[in-house]
């Protein structure tokens, strides 16, 4: 059922929010031991929120998600609920305030089931870098759910919440959505407030919704998007009624297929499923043309210079003084060293060292400054492409979900799984992943749509048409009951 359908049944009193919340809590207790999607289950808070929602429904009050059980990635601050970023260094940190997105969800009546697992500080593509647990892919449990929002994608695909929030710095919503066979949307940079989002790479991070259908994405995006005076990078705009675009015709819509995304390295099944989806769009009346994004080949290197530089700056605040973990030493320098040595995981340390290096005297011009210039060229590629097309279609990832442990000791190989998602972050564009089929091992395949800035409605419109036509399963049979 979609959020809209659940809301209608809550209004008709076919069941209460309390009953619905207990249903999900029982599913979490039954299945999450084998999946590992939740870091913290906020049972008491969830039941209290559900009872409050029932009282509001009884009084005839309304809200876009009144009484709907959701869960959020553990990088988003939640007042009074521990927020760790899946890192030992933030263990015990309880934010005194809600992130803007949480505040907006609460105002519309959501029920918060808990906080979801992730790669530590959102650094990773498999959710194996969490300091606390790994998360498994519900379609095949020896496979990764993707990352860094692996907990957010696995929880939705297992039916352990109605929908979730993730974050996307280089593909961390879209790649796990693709691996788990669900829908995930990274909004335009600045469209959703980052206030209360613990920063990894500030010029790239975005919060976005993950769900089992396009309708839920549209409803959640409408709630969390819009200007926020607490975020200096927030765009001054009011979100449109995204829901109203669902079901609109796509005849005449211009689809661009970048030739640089269909070269070596793509799995045969992924290429075939993507091609079939493009053919379907053509059959439905869209115009399909090949385009070129010539600087795509530099995107991965550019991303890892910029994101590590920003991470080294953002994570300097975790020193044992202000937040979470503190390991005492004989003086303050030793305390810093011991705290960071114990508190940060291997991948986080690797990125801090890389970022510090590219920003250091003598290397800034050679690396960071040059990467910033290439980023401008990548953005211009997209600007040129959107003069001749309305939406760009690519595979979300070159492969389906890989095995747990397969790439954890080869970071460069791991980084390549985000090769198709990173350019949209560098350019600040909205992009989403939707399921478009399965490979020969019955693992989900994701299709990526990229749009012009603040044109999320076009992506939702196209995705809705494909969802209705393709009818791809979004939850494994063993979790249907």
Image (tube, rainbow, N blue to C red):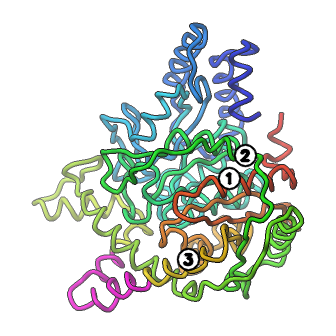
Q: Could you say which is closer to the camera, residue 418 or residue 263? A: 263
Range covered by the magenta-colored residues: 353-374
Please state if 398 lies on the left or on the right of 280 as rendered.
left
Number of residues whose C-alpha sits closer than 10 Å to that of mark 1, classed few (under 14), some (14–19) or many (20 or more)? many
- Answer with left or right where residue 159 lies relative to residue 383: right
Residue 117's place in the image compared with 60, above or below, is below
Real-space Cα distance between discs 2 and 1?
7 Å
Q: How far apart are marks 1 and 3 (CA)?
A: 19 Å
Q: What element carries label 1?
A: helix
Q: Which mark is residue 246?
A: 2
Left or right for 91, reference 212: left
Q: Quadrant of the C terminus?
A: top right
Mark number displayed over residue 239: none
Q: Which residue is painted at 66% across and 72% down in the image?
A: 406
Callouts 2 and 1 close, C-beta under 8 Å: yes
Q: Tell me the quarter of the picture where residue 70 sits.
A: top right
Q: Residue at 50%, 22% (x, y): give it.
A: 44
Q: Does the magenta stretch include residue 292?
A: no
The x and y percentages for residue 28 are: 66, 34
Residue at numbered disc 1 = 460
Give the image quarter of residue 149. Answer: bottom right
Mark 3 neighbour class, 10 Å CA radius: few under 14, some 14 to 19, many 20 or more: many
The residue beneath circle 3 is 382
């Amino acid at each position: 059922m979609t959020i809209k359908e659940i809301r209608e049944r809550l209004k008709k009193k076919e069941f209460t929010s309390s009953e619905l919340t207990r249903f999900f809590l029982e599913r979490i207790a039954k299945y999450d031991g084998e999946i590992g999607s939740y870091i913290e289950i906020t049972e008491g808070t969830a039941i209290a929120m559900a009872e409050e929602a029932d009282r509001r429904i009884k009084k005839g009050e309304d809200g876009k998600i009144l009484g709907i059980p959701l869960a959020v990635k553990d990088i988003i601050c939640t007042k009074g609920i521990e927020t760790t970023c899946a890192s030992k260094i933030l263990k015990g940190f309880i934010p005194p305030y809600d992130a803007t997105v949480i505040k907006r969800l609460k105002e519309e009546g959501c029920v918060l089931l808990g906080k979801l697992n992730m790669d530590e500080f959102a650094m990773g593509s498999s959710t194996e870098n969490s300091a606390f647990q790994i998360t498994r892919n519900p379609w095949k449990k020896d496979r990764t759910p993707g990352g860094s929002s692996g907990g957010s994608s696995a929880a939705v695909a297992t039916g352990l919440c109605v929908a979730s929030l993730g974050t996307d710095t280089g593909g961390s919503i879209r790649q796990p959505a693709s691996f788990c066979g669900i829908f995930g949307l990274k909004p335009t940079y600045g469209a959703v407030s980052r206030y209360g989002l613990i920063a990894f790479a500030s010029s790239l991070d975005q919060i976005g919704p993950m769900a089992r259908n396009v309708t839920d994405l549209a409803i959640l995006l409408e709630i969390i998007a819009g200007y926020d005076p607490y975020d200096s990078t927030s765009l001054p705009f009011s979100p449109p009624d995204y829901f109203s675009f669902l079901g609109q015709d796509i005849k005449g819509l211009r689809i661009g297929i970048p030739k640089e995304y269909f070269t070596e390295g793509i799995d045969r099944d992924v290429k075939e499923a993507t091609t079939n989806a493009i053919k379907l769009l053509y059959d439905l009346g869209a115009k399909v043309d090949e385009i070129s994004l010539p600087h795509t080949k530099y995107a991965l290197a550019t991303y890892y210079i910029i994101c590590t530089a920003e991470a080294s700056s953002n994570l300097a605040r975790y020193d044992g003084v202000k937040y979470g973990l503190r390991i005492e030493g004989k003086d303050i320098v030793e305390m810093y060293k011991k705290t960071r040595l114990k508190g940060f995981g291997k991948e986080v340390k690797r990125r801090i060292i890389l970022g510090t290096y590219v920003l250091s005297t003598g290397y800034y011009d050679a690396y960071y400054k040059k990467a910033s210039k290439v980023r401008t060229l990548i953005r211009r590629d997209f600007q040129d492409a959107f003069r001749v097309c309305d939406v760009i279609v690519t595979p979300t990832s070159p492969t389906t979900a890989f095995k747990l442990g397969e790439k954890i000791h080869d970071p460069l190989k791991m980084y390549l799984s985000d090769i198709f998602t990173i350019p949209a972050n560098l350019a600040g564009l909205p992009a989403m992943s939707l399921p478009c089929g399965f490979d020969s091992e019955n693992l989900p395949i994701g299709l990526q749509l990229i749009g012009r800035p603040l044109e999320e409605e076009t992506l939702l419109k196209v995705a809705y048409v494909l969802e209705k036509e393709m009818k791809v399963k979004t939850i494994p049979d063993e979790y249907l009951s």
